[in-house]
């Protein structure tokens, strides 16, 4: 049972972190354009990203409830984190992102690594 504590805590923390960072995006569309021009010209993509990201946070809470049952969902969870974190890292290397953005991308890459570790440590049912 102790082996289940790590994935439970990890996915709960990831879900909380993600909700705290993602939910405010619904109210920041115009502010982002002001602070980091140019303005967002395709709001459907922006809100679509926010919605998909928020849905994944709910998936993390579900995984946390029963890691062995949802063990296979840990793989796409890691891919979700790599998708954002990897993109931010590449864009930063190209000089197209700020260092503040890199911090969030690296956090996602850390979560991806920890998700894969949780996958390895979680017993199959």
Image (tube, helix red, strand yellow):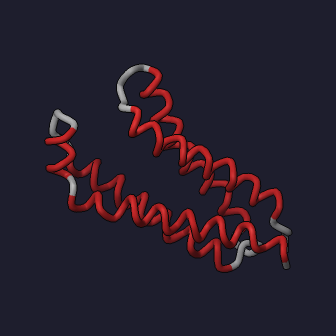
Q: Quadrant of the C terminus?
A: bottom right
Question: Is residue 106 depicted above or below 19 in this figure?
Answer: above
Question: Is residue 123 depicted above or below 106 in this figure?
Answer: below
Left or right? Give the position of 54 relative to 115: left
Question: Is residue 91 depicted above or below 46 in this figure?
Answer: above
Looking at the picture, how far across and down is residue 7, in whole percent? 71, 67
Rendered residue at 48%/27% (across/down):
90
Front residue of this view, candidates 98 and 22: 98
Rendered residue at 38%/21% (across/down):
95
Rendered residue at 56%/63% (across/down):
14
Looking at the picture, how far across and down is residue 112, in whole percent? 63, 49
Rendered residue at 57%/43% (across/down):
82
Most extreme residue toward the top is: 94
Left or right? Give the position of 58 relative to 74: left
Front residue of this view, candidates 52 and 90: 90
Question: Is residue 85 depicted above or below 93 in this figure?
Answer: below
Front residue of this view, candidates 75 and 102: 102
Front residue of this view, candidates 44 and 15: 15
Which picture quadrant has residue 72? bottom right
């Amino acid at each position: 049972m102790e082996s289940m504590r790590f994935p439970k805590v990890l996915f709960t923390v990831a879900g909380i972190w993600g909700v705290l960072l993602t939910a405010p995006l619904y109210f920041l569309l115009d502010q982002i354009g002001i602070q980091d021009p140019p303005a967002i010209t395709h709001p459907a993509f922006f809100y679509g990203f926010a919605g998909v990201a928020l849905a994944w946070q709910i998936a993390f809470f579900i995984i946390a409830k029963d890691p062995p049952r949802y063990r296979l969902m840990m793989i796409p969870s890691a891919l979700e984190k790599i998708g954002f974190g990897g993109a931010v890292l590449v864009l930063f290397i190209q000089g197209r992102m700020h260092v503040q953005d890199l911090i969030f991308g690296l956090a996602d890459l850390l979560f991806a690594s920890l998700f894969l570790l949780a996958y390895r440590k979680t017993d199959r049912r």
